[in-house]
Image (cartoon, rainbow, N blue to C red):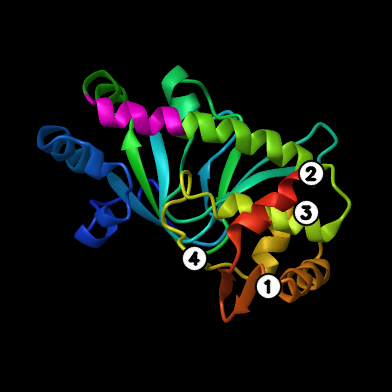
Amino acid sequence: MDSLYQRRRHASEDELLGIPWLHLLSPLERERAVDELRVGDAAVGDYVCRVGRPVNYWFGVVSGLLKMSNDSADGQTMTFTGVPPGGWFGEGTVIKRENYRYNIQALRKSVVAGLPVETFHWLLDHSLGFNRFVMNQLNERLGQFIAAREIDRMSNPEIKVARSLAQLFNPVLFSGVGEVLRITQQELAYLVGLSRQRVNEALRTLEAQQLIRIEYGGLRILNLDELRRSMFR
C-alpha cells in the first residue's frame, strides 16, 4: 500500500473550506498557500508523524480523527490529545524545524492537509492574519498540554472523560467540530486511556447531568460551559 505521502493530492474546493486560516490571508497569500497545500487520505492506523522524523509539513485535519501520543521509557503509550476536524498541530516544531517528538496516528479514516515548511515560514514573514492564527494556536496549545498532564493523573472516570471532551470541543483549536463530535466510544477510550465500558458509564453520567447527548456515531454538546467547569473541580 502506498504511504500517506505518496497518496497526497491537491485539495478540493470543499476541502479548502475546512481549513480555518485560509480566509485570514490576502488574495496573493491565499493563492500561494492553496497552490502549495496537499491533502492525503489516511486509513485507520496510518501515521501522519513519527517520533524522530524531520518536519516537512504543518498538518491539519479536514475530516476524521487523529491522536497525538508518545511512548514512555517503560514502553507505555501516553496520549496527549485527539485532533478532530479543524485542528492544526505542530506549529512549534515547524517554527524550530525540529524532528517530531510525538506520534500522530489516524483513529479513523481521515483527510489530512499539509502545508510545506517553507510556505509556512513564508506566510509568517508576510501575513499578519496568519501570524495571529499561529500565536493563538500556540497559546491554546500550552493550556491544552498542561490540562492533558492533569487528566492523565486522574482516577475519576467522569471528570477524566468530561475534561477530555471539553478539550476536543475547543473552538480555537478545533473549529470544525461544532456542536457534534463524530467519535465512537472506543475511539474516546483510546484517547482518555480508559476501557470502553468505563467510558460508556462516564458518558451516561454526563448525559444524565444534561451536559451531553449520545447520538448515533457521535456526541452532541448540550452545556459546554458546565462541561468546562468540570476541568477546575
Q: Would residue 83 appear left or right of 34 to someone viewing this image?
A: right
For marks 1 and 3 on the same chain, the one whose residue lies earlier in the sequence: 3
Spatial distance from mark 2 to mark 1, Cα to Cα?
Answer: 25 Å
Rendered image quadrant of residue 122: top left
Residue sitting at x 20%, y 36%: 25
Coordinates of residue 141 in the picture (x, y in percent): 55, 34
Circle 3 is placed at which residue position?
A: 160
Mark 4 vs mark 2, CA separation in Å: 25 Å
Is any part of residue 55 visible from this angle? Answer: no
Residue located farthest toward the right when viewing the structure as drawn = 155
Residue contact at pointers 4 and 3, CB within 8 angstroms: no
Q: Which residue is mark 1?
A: 210
Amino acid residing under circle 4: Glu
- Please say if 112 is above or below 129: below
Report whether 87 appears left or right of 120: right
Mark 1 Cα shell of 10 Å, populated few (<14), some (14-19), many (≥20): some
Q: Earlier in the sequence, mark 2 or mark 1?
A: 2
Measured as percent of width and height from the top left, residue 150 is found at 77, 39
Classify the position of the N terminus by image quarter.
bottom left
Asked whether disc 1 touches disc 3, contact meaning CB atoms under 8 Å apart, the reply is: no
Chief SS of the magenta region: helix
Q: What is the spatial separation of the Cα atoms under label 1 and label 3, in whole angstroms? A: 17 Å
| Above or below: residue 105 compared with residue 59 | below
> Which badge, 3 or 2, is on the more N-terminal residue?
2
The part of the chain drawn in magenta is 127-136
Residue 152's label in the rendered image is: 2
Q: Which mark is nearer the camera, 4 or 2?
A: 4
